[in-house]
């Protein structure tokens, strides 16, 4: 048994495996399949202040080794979450990270201030990168200035550690990661989904009701790994990597390029116990390679000759 | 236990694009109810990536049956599985038909279009067990699209068929046949499954006559257990209709709760 524990500075995790927001519901959906205490933590589905309708269907389309979604952050809102879901999550021995959304800067703050008063939350993940809620996939994390501004504002109001979730739909991820760090983020997580389009040739229509969507799954892993690597090179705060992680080996690759922790996303849909299994596979790989601590892998990619 | 990664195919039949598998899985069969569905992994590896939602066709003590039509890459791979091979199944999932109340001597009409016939076999057996008189309407474009009519007949169900081209039974849509028969009878309940336009039409026929009807909806699903919010339809629940999850709130809904204009 290797030591899989990870210290993010602001949060100690049992192991590096978190679940990615939007792919794990509010956590309770998975308890028939998976003991949540086997995970480093869970990141629950993004929350606006009030309930949110989401996008018209079709909301999903499968592509080669990938999934494009345009759910549009349908959700229950923070009050329902705090009253009905959080008390149940508190009974599970796992770190609960809440993904915070906002249609405006004010709404992000309102959500954070409401959640500040609730027990049983380990950190906030600031969702500044969802491609499915504004025209053409626009989001604050597409721009360094707006990234820094919103992180800075959230930092002032948040009583909890703040993780900025970044978008891959940018020209220079290092610059955006630095902007989040400069704004006061305790960590960055990346990547959110890649802005994508699928077409039905026969009907000449987009396959998603929202036209555009976000691509996830194994298809995006090489891109996500590259961006995680670039972000980790650019900032001193911890980087949490995600994109197409299906196995423990995938997760360890992210750690090797500099991620201190990882998030498992689309895999949860296919096997609801995937995140737990992945943590087990990381352990087994470390044992096979005589590695006592998983944290020793972080940033050990050999790029020299 | 809701996942069986090694459920063995113990029997299979094929009619063109249509396939019927009997799958051994004591763990999953024990909890099965008509109207529920399975999420089936069609291949190992990452392509196809997602499981495919497939209706439960029938269930016994230690087996399940699925009846499906090849619709794309995933179901084509599934169709190639041989007897003795194992498949990875999650389920049974969703809420099945609501069958409370006294069905003794009551007429239950089951209306299936194409592969939509799938959940109605299991349902027919359960309704008959409750004393209902079950009549099955089975429609397809051609005779080749209604391959399991004989299975219903052998099981002793009253069966009427329709084909769009008149190659077998009533010539026309199954909803036209239904409309005709509703002129002379008042069943206690209708149970409808098929393509969306067929279900909308059948639902309207039932609603216009004040007959209770339950519809089994279909959707592209990411997970099948409520986590992805991908399979929504506008459904009323004491409100005027919100995007609700077919996998978790359904897949069976009352006709009056479905908002057809929504999607």
Image (cartoon, coloured by chain):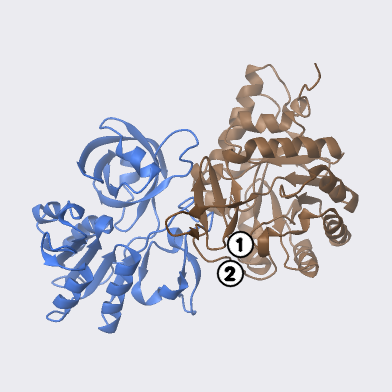
Chain colours: A brown, B blue
Q: Which residue is mark 1?
A: A72
Tell me how far mark 1 sits from mark 2, CA to CA.
Answer: 8 Å
Quadrant of the snapshot with the N terminus of chain A: top right
Q: Are marks 1 and 2 in contact (CB under 8 Å)?
A: yes
Residue B95 seen by the camera: yes
Quarter-wise, where is residue A108 in the image?
Answer: bottom right
Q: Residue A154, located in which quarter of the rendered image?
A: bottom right
Residue density around tag 1, few if under 14, some if 14–19, many if 20 or more, within 10 Å: many
Residue A279 placement (x, y as % from top left): 62, 33
Residue B259 visible within the image: no
Vertical comparison of A135 with B39: above or below: below
Give residue B180's position: percent from left, percent from top. Answer: 15, 77
Chain of the residue that carries numbered disc 2 in the rendered image: A
**Which residue is painted at 37% across and 63% down in the image?**
B217
Q: Which label number is shown at residue A53?
A: 2
Q: Earlier in the sequence, mark 1 or mark 2?
A: 2
Please report, as a chain letter, where disc 1 is located. A
SS category of the residue bearing label 2: loop
Q: Which mark is residue A156?
A: none
Q: Quadrant of the C terminus of chain A?
A: top right
Left or right for A213, reference B257: right
- Label 2 packing within 10 angstroms: few (<14), some (14-19), many (20+): some
Residue nearest the viewer, comparing B159 with B128: B159
- Same chain shared by disc 1 and disc 2: yes
Residue beneath the point at 72% across and 21% down: A292
């Amino acid at each position: 048994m290797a030591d899989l524990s990870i210290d993010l500075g602001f949060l100690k995790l049992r192991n590096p495996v978190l679940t990615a927001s939007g792919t794990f519901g509010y956590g309770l959906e998975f308890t028939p399949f998976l003991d949540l205490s086997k995970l480093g933590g869970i990141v629950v589905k993004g929350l606006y202040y009030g309930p949110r309708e989401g996008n018209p269907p079709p909301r999903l389309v499968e592509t080669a080794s990938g999934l494009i979604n345009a759910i549009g952050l349908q959700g229950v809102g923070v009050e329902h979450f705090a009253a009905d879901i959080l008390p149940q999550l508190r009974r599970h021995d796992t770190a609960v990270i809440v993904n915070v959304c906002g249609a405006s800067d004010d709404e992000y703050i309102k959500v954070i201030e409401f959640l500040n008063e609730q027990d049983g939350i380990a950190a906030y993940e600031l969702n500044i990168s969802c491609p499915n809620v504004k025209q053409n996939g626009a989001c604050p994390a597409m721009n360094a200035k707006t990234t820094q501004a919103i992180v800075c504002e959230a930092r002032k109001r948040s009583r909890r550690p703040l993780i900025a979730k970044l978008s891959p739909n940018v020209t220079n991820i290092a610059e955006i990661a630095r902007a989040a760090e400069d704004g006061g983020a305790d960590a960055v997580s990346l990547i959110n989904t890649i802005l994508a389009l699928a077409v039905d040739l026969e009907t000449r229509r987009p396959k998603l009701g929202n036209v555009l969507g976000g691509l996830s799954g194994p298809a995006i892993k090489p891109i996500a790994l590259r961006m995680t690597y670039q972000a980790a090179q650019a900032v001193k705060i911890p980087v949490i990597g995600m994109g197409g992680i299906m196995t423990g080996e995938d997760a360890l690759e992210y750690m090797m390029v500099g991620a201190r922790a990882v998030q498992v996303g689309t895999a949860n849909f296919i096997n609801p116990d995937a995140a737990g299994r992945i943590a087990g596979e990381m352990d087994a790989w470390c044992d096979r390679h005589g590695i006592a601590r998983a944290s020793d892998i972080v940033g050990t990619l050999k790029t020299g000759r | 236990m809701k996942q069986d990664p090694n459920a063995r195919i113990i029997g299979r039949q094929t009619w063109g694009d249509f396939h019927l598998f009997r799958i051994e899985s004591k763990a999953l069969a024990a909890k099965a109810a008509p109207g529920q569905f399975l999420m089936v992994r069609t291949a190992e590896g990452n392509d196809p990536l997602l499981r495919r939602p497939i209706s439960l066709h029938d269930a016994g003590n230690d087996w399940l049956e699925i009846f499906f039509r090849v619709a794309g890459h995933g179901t084509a791979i599934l169709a190639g599985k041989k007897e003795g091979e194992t498949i990875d199944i999650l389920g049974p999932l969703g809420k099945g038909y609501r069958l409370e109340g006294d069905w003794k001597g009551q007429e239950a009409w089951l209306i299936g279009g194409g592969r939509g016939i799938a959940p109605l076999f299991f349902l027919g057996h359960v309704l008959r067990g409750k004393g209902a008189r079950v009549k099955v309407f089975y429609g397809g474009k051609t005779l080749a699209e209604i391959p399991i009519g004989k299975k219903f007949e052998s099981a002793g169900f009253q069966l009427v068929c329709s084909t769009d081209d008149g190659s077998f039974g009533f010539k026309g849509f199954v909803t036209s046949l239904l409309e005709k028969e509703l002129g002379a009878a008042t069943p206690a309940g209708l149970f409808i499954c098929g393509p969306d336009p067929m279900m909308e039409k059948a639902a309207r026929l039932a609603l216009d006559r004040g007959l209770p009807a339950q519809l089994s909806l279909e959707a592209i699903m990411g997970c099948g257990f409520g986590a992805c919010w991908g399979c929504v339809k506008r459904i009323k629940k004491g409100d005027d209709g919100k995007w609700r999850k077919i996998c978790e709130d359904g897949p069976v809904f009352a006709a009056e709760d479905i908002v057809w204009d929504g999607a």
